Amino acid sequence: MSAKVELIELRSACRAWSISRRTASRWIAAGLAPMPIRNGTHKSVLLSHEVTALVGARLAGWTDDEVRRLVAQLMAKRPMVAAELLAEAA
């Protein structure tokens, strides 16, 4: 994998998106933001490139439907990202 994968806490993602945690929950429920990953320490995290992609989509003025498609694509790629990380670690 060429890019470094970093995890960002949901609260930091909310700051990057300039929204509250409550709004983030609404966006997640509506498919407008990726589902957070529970890291086992009662914290929710996201992949940094997902947060950045959503910022770019909003800056570009994408519609909610376009953002939903982006989020679906990002979520669909998570298993591949995990497989690449596991392959590198082996």
Image (cartoon, helix red, strand yellow):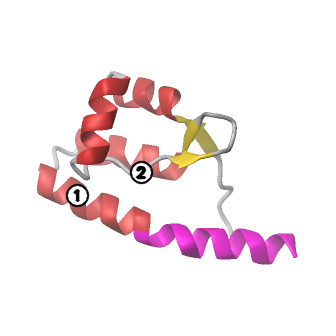
> In the rendered view, would you say 73 is above or below 6?
below
Judged by its main secondary structure, the magenta piece is helix
* Residue at the image point whose x is 24% and y is 64% from the top: 69
**Does the rendering let one see residue 3?**
yes
Name the residue carrying label 1: 68
Quarter holding the C terminus is bottom right
Rendered location of residue 56, percent (x, y): 33, 45
Quadrant of the rendered image containing residue 86? bottom right
Q: Residues within 10 Å of mark 1 (few under 14, many from 20)?
A: some
Q: Residue furthest right?
A: 90
Span highlighted in magenta in the image: 76-90
Please tell me which residue lies in front, 79 or 58.
Answer: 79
> For numbered disc 2, what is the local secondary structure?
loop
Rendered location of residue 40, percent (x, y): 68, 43
Rendered location of residue 35, percent (x, y): 41, 51
> In the rendered view, would you say 10 is above or below 64?
above
**Does the rendering let one see residue 47?**
no
